[in-house]
Amino acid sequence: MIKDNLRYTKEHEWILIEGEVGTVGITDFAQGELGDVVYLELPEVGAPVTFGESFGTIEAVKAVAELYAPVTGTITEVNTALSNQAALVNSDCYGAGWMVKIKLSHPSEVDGLLSPKDYEQLTA
């Protein structure tokens, strides 16, 4: 499942842009590859993140993986529900399983992300 209103990274993160803030999570493809998610390490509100650099980790039964920032900015919100319900990433990766919200420092970075069509080709 690839949503048309999102942009994607080659590392399988998605971002939904709403004004100056982007909501970030991992794609359906990524959660399927990882298997059952059991733990996430996410940054705190106020933490800076940099485009293409790690902002946390996701631990699943099969593997531990880095999470990469699709944009540069500052964390404005963290999905605290994931600390007790990491499986939301599996059951609703584009909804309740979102991870962080980032206030964009350089909105033009979004232009360099994959379109839904490009992401579909990447994962085909």
Image (cartoon, rainbow, N blue to C red):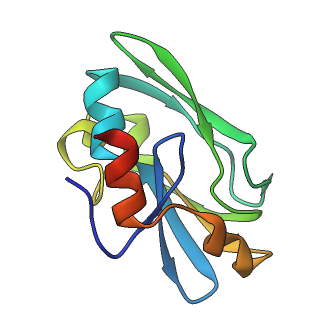
> x, y percentage for residue 13?
48, 48
Quarter occupied by residue 116: bottom left
Question: Residue 103 occupies which quadrant of the picture?
Answer: bottom right
| Residue located at (40% from left, 44% from top) | 122
The residue lying toward the viewer, choosing from 8 and 53, is 8
Q: Above or below — where is 23 with respect to 40?
A: below
Residue at the bottom extreme of this rendering:
19
Taking the image as shown, residue 30 lies to the left or right of residue 22, namely left
Q: Is residue 103 left or right of residue 97?
A: right
- Residue at the location (80% across, 53% down)? 50
Looking at the image, can residue 86 be seen? Answer: no
Q: Is residue 20 above or below residue 103?
A: below
Closest to the observer, 102 or 71: 71
**In the image, residue 58 lies at what x, y percent?**
49, 28
Left/right placement of residue 74 relative to residue 110 reads right
Quadrant of the snapshot with the C terminus = top left
Residue placed at 76% from the left, 63% from the top?
A: 72
- On the picture, is 97 further left or further right than 45? left
Labels in figure, total? 0
The residue shown at (75%, 55%) is: 51
* Percent x, y of residue 80: 46, 49
